[in-house]
Image (cartoon, rainbow, N blue to C red):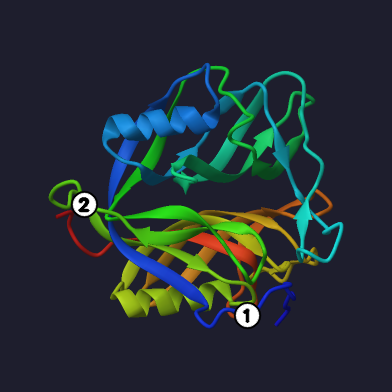
Amino acid sequence: MRSIRHPGPIASERFAAMPCAAEPLTLRLEAGSSINDAVAQALAVAGFSSGYIRLRNARVDPMRYVVPAASPDGTHAAWYSDISAPEGITVIEDAGLVAGRRDERAFFHCHGIWRTPDGVRRMGHLLPLDSRLAEPVEVTAWGIEGALFDVRDDAETNFRLFAPIRAPLLGERRGRRAAICTVRPNEDIGQAIEALCRRHGFDHASIQGIGSLVGADFDDGSAVSSYATEVLVTDGAVRSGRCTLDIALVGMDGVISAGRLRRDANPVCVTFELLVVASDEKSA
C-alpha cells in the first residue's frame, strides 16, 4: 500500500475517537458574513458548538480556496496551492464542513465541489474565514454534543489539526449514539473506520467526513496517483461491520475524481475527520 513520510515522530495511536450524541438539524445560514461566522451563528442558535454540515447549492462571493500542492521545504510532507480567487458568484454544489474550535473560537474545515463563474467545475479546500455567502441557504447538519473537534498542534505532521476532545453535555442526550474521529497518516481509511466501529460498538452506521488520501484506488479499477489529495465523503456506511465509502477528491493537478474506494488500498495522507452515527437504534 502507498505511504507518505511526515517530518515528525510517528504517533503510537493511529486513530482517535470520542463518543458523543449527534442530532440531525436543518440550519439557515445567513448572507453577509464569512461562511465561518454564518455556520457558527446557525449552530449556536440550535444550541451546538460542534457539528458536521453538508453545504449544497450555495452561492458564494467572494470565494477563496486552495488545492493540495508539494511542500516548498522539508517542514511538511505536502502543502497548499496559491489561493484561487474567482471573480463573481461561485456555486457550491456539495461540500462537507467539520465544525469545531481553534484557539477558543469557532473554526471550520471544509472540502467541496463548486462551479466557478467561468462555468468550470472545481474542487478544493475552502477558506471559511475569507469566503462569504451571497445569499442565505438552508443546509442539513448534525449537531454534536458531548465532544467537539479542537485544533491542536500535531507533532507527526507538523500541522495544526482537529482532534476529538470531550465536551460537557448541556442536558439529556437528544440525538443518536455517535463518535467523532480522526485517522492518522498511512492508515487505510476503511480499515480504520471498521476498527473504530468495533471499538465503539457500531454494527451499522453512517459515515460523514473529509480528509486526505495518498492517491486513491477505486472499485472500478481507476486510480489517482497524486500523493496529496483533498477528499469529501459523499456517501459512507458501515453495515454489519463492513465499511463502504463513496468519495470525491481533487489531486495536485486540480482534476476531480469520484467513486467507491477499493478495500484495503487507500492510506490517509495527513488526516481524516469523521462523524460516525449509529443507524441501528432509535434516538434517545
Q: Are marks 2 and 1 in contact (CB under 8 Å)?
A: no
Across and down, in percent, residue 7 comes to 74, 72
Q: Amino acid at mark 1?
A: Ile
In the picture shown, does residue 139 fall above or below 233? above
Tag shown at residue 91: none
Q: Nearer the viewer, residue 217 or 1?
A: 1
Name the residue at the right extreme: 72
Across and down, in percent, residue 268 comes to 63, 69
Residue 240 appears in the picture as rendered: no
Tag shown at residue 10: 1
Q: Quadrant of the N terminus?
A: bottom right
Task: Tell me which residue sits at (45%, 46%) in the image.
Answer: 101
**Circle 1 sits in a helix, a strand or a loop, which is it?**
loop
**Circle 2 sits in a helix, a strand or a loop, which is it?**
loop
Residue 88 appears in the picture as rendered: yes
58 left or right of 240 in image: right
Give the mark nearer the N terminus: 2 vs 1.
Answer: 1
Q: Amino acid at mark 2?
A: Leu
Label 2 and label 1: CA atoms lie apart by 33 Å
In the picture shown, does residue 22 fall above or below 118? below
Across and down, in percent, residue 265 comes to 65, 78
Q: Quadrant of the C terminus?
A: bottom left
**In which quadrant of the rendered view does residue 259 lie?**
bottom right
Across and down, in percent, residue 125 comes to 66, 45
Task: Tell me which residue sits at (50%, 79%) in the image.
Answer: 13
Tag shown at residue 169: 2
Q: Nearer the viewer, residue 75 or 34?
A: 75
* Few, some or many residues within 10 Å of mark 2 (<14, 14–19, 20+): some
Task: Tell me which residue sits at (64%, 72%) in the image.
Answer: 156
